[in-house]
Amino acid sequence: MTMRAKCWVAGIGIPVLLIVLLAIFWSWNWFIPMVDSRASAALGRKVTMSHLHVRLGRVVTVRAGNVQIDNPKGFPATQPFAKIRQLTIRFNIIDYLFHNRTVVPLIDLNHPVINAVATPAQVDNYTFKAAKPSKPGKPKPPPEIGTLTIESGLAHVVDPKLKANLRLVIDTRAATGIVAKHR
């Protein structure tokens, strides 16, 4: 083999080999620390997850496993605010990139457990501070959310002021009848 042929094979073969190795060993879990950090900053409390998978396309599907949202600082940490066995979000990337609209066709919560608690001093763990706009001027429109599904959800709501201590089981079902026709 000539020197020129060896250079050509090395020049093409090495990048192809690297791409193949990257495809074989690629893991979206490498991005978990960054996603945890961004979600924690957005919600003002610690957010963690154990698994992350992304399916790219016109509508990006993000699946996060074992998501936990802790209570805010200064709040008793007996139980976290929320635990979700699997969170699936579909995000329309084309609308975001070309129309500057946030379109979320689906949010699916699989086995969420929510502990919404207020103390007698009226401090609660379910109020989130609104994010400040990154640019002054015209505010962005709110996100357009399509379907919200909750599978095998549990919620514990405590509010001493209302003398409420509720335990709820939440399971969404597809709409039928007149409601479904008006969509």
Image: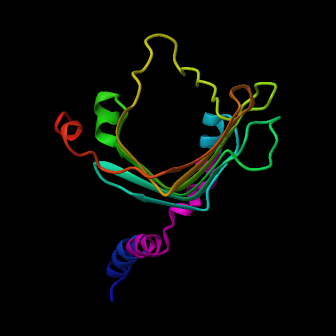
Question: Which corner quadrant of the image does residue 54 belong to?
Answer: bottom left
Q: Is residue 70 left or right of residue 56?
A: right
Q: Magenta span has 69?
A: no
| Residue nearer the viewer, 92 or 20 | 92
Quarter holding the C terminus is top left
Quarter holding the N terminus is bottom left
| Residue nearer the viewer, 133 or 24 | 133
Q: Is residue 16 above or below residue 73?
A: below
Q: Magenta span has 30?
A: yes
Which segment is the magenta one?
Answer: 16-36
Q: Residue at horizontal 29%, vertical 35%?
A: 95
Question: Which corner quadrant of the image does residue 84 belong to?
Answer: bottom right
| Residue nearer the viewer, 2 or 105 | 105
Residue 155: x percent and y percent?
59, 47
Q: Is residue 5 above or below residue 150?
A: below
Question: Which corner quadrant of the image does residue 20 belong to?
Answer: bottom left
Residue closest to the far left: 181
Residue 148: x percent and y percent?
39, 44
Q: Is residue 11 above or below residue 93?
A: below
Residue 141: x percent and y percent?
39, 21
Q: Residue at horizontal 70%, vertical 45%?
A: 70
Residue closest to the far bottom: 1
| Residue nearer the viewer, 157 or 27 | 157
**Magenta stretch secondary structure, dominant:** helix
Residue 61: x percent and y percent?
38, 53
